Image (tube, grey):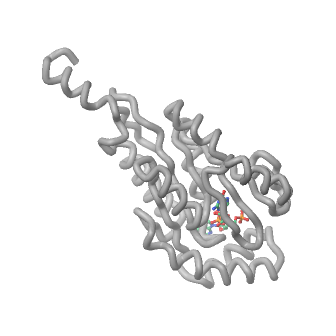
Amino acid sequence: MSSKVESPVPRRGLMLVISSPSGAGKSSLSRRLIAEHPRLELSVSCTTRAPRPGETDGVEYHFVTPERFAELVAEDAFLEWADVHDHRYGTLRAPVMAALEAGRDVVFDIDWQGGRQITDRAKADVVLVFILPPSLPALRARLQGRAQDSAEVIERRLTRATEEIAHYDEYDYVIVNDQFEAAYRALLEIYQGEQHRRHRHPGLKAFVAELMAGQA
Ligand code: ADP
Ligand code: 5GP
């Protein structure tokens, strides 16, 4: 269960970037966090890859053609975008900005290239979390168990895994997702703790001034 300690001072929304090699568990962890926190929403990326069985346009991704993706790049519609696994993936800027302005938090399931670009653009609002698998055999077993990809695609994802893992040290927090419950608890603590960072409460100075004057 998540505990809630709300500050009387309104808070800016934060951007929770979660990266990992494919199969380490970032979607499972972020889905659970979102399910338990109505203020938190998932950024739905655009991708040029085909939907996997069970994926729905507008839910996991906006599935677009390479031509449409190029148009969106030309229109500067992306907060960040990158080539991943021979396809293009990008985060639309407008829905993220609307969420943050409304005081909501946004989770990003994006790779290290995206994490780096978002950090360059909005460092103060970004929290970077990297998920590691307990071992490469466990990662392989999870990709096989997920049963969404062909053997060839799984091999490509595993080859890319080491490349993604090499960037773990650009992240604020690192969680080894061995036991799911323990990993989830760690993510929850990070999210809850980060909400209380002083700079996320722009009204704090006025609140403290009133407090000191005995009016709060
Ligand atoms: P990612 O989003 O990083 O590609 P997923 O969340 O899709 O990874 O997880 C890959 C597979 O591993 C899924 O079938 C998921 O249920 C499973 N999984 C996630 N975390 C664990 C864990 N701690 N132990 C065992 N299996 C897990
Ligand atoms: P998948 O094809 O398994 O859904 O995603 C492959 C990889 O692309 C994952 O590492 C995922 O984090 C990354 N990814 C998904 N959306 C985006 C995005 O909008 N931007 C970037 N940079 N990476 C993304």
Give the quadrant of the C terminus: top left
Image height check: is 76 above or below 89? above
- Name the quadrant containing residue 28: bottom right
**In the visual, does 61 lie left or right of 107?**
right
Where residue 161 sits: x, y (%)? Answer: 62, 78
Q: Residue furthest front?
A: 74
Q: Please state if 162 lies on the left or on the right of 73 as rendered.
A: left
Residue situated in front as seen by the camera: 72 or 143: 72
Lateral position of residue 112 relative to residue 191, left or right? right
Give the vertical position of 120 relative to 11 (above or below): below
Could you tell whether 74 is left or right of 178 in the image? right
Q: Position of residue 182 (x, y in %)?
A: 46, 62
Closer to us: 68 or 37: 68
* Residue 193 % position (x, y): 36, 48
Residue located 79% across and 77% down the image: 153
Outermost residue to the top: 215
Residue at figure coordinates x 68%, y 56% from the top left: 90
Report x, y in % for residue 157.
Answer: 70, 77
Residue 60 in sight here: no
Determine whether 97 is above or below 188 in the image.
above
Q: Residue at x 61, y 56 (%)?
A: 80
